[in-house]
Amino acid sequence: MHLILLAGGIPYHTIKDEHLTQAIAQHERMEWPPHISQEFNELMLRCWHRNPDSRPNFDLLYKEMKQYVKHAKKHIKLKDYPFNVYVPTKPPDTSWEKMQDSFV
């Protein structure tokens, strides 16, 4: 069985909803999450590059993410996890068993 952990945050939590479209159009990006390494953050920023041709392709992302998994404690520091901006969620109880089976 595989364990799946999702840690979704509230995107752009410091920007008011009415200013969000303008902020994104001006290429503002979310703050560097304090619980991830600088290298991981730089990978995320490359994925948001203005020029789509300059973004990493999926093969490159896969290779880089594989390296991050090998050194997960270096790249994801849960002790620095900002619980105040993250909303805990879980799938509905009725579908969780089916969901687990589909990932095994």
Image (cartoon, rainbow, N blue to C red):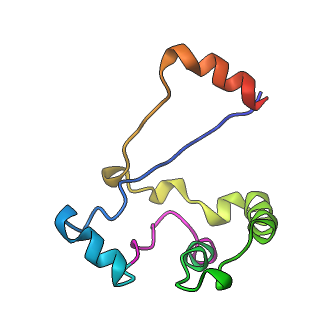
Q: Position of residue 52 (x, y in %)?
A: 61, 80
Residue 16, placed above or below residue 82: below
- What is the span of residues highlighted in magenta in the rendered image? 29-40
Q: Residue at x 65, y 25 (%)?
A: 99
Q: Position of residue 66 (x, y in %)?
A: 79, 61
Which quadrant is home to the N terminus?
Answer: top right
Residue 102 magenta: no
Res 25 quadrant in image: bottom left
Q: Residue at x 43, y 35 (%)?
A: 89
Q: Position of residue 49 (x, y in %)?
A: 56, 82
Main secondary structure found in the magenta portion: loop
Residue 28, placed above or below residue 66: below
Among all residues in the image, which is located at the extreme top? 94
Q: Is residue 62 left or right of residue 48?
A: right
Which quadrant is home to the C terminus?
Answer: top right
Q: Is residue 97 left or right of residue 34?
A: right
Res 21 quadrant in image: bottom left
> Closest to the observer: 42 or 103?
103
Q: Is residue 83 left or right of residue 66?
A: left
Q: Residue at x 50, y 48 (%)?
A: 7
Q: Residue at x 45, y 73 (%)?
A: 32
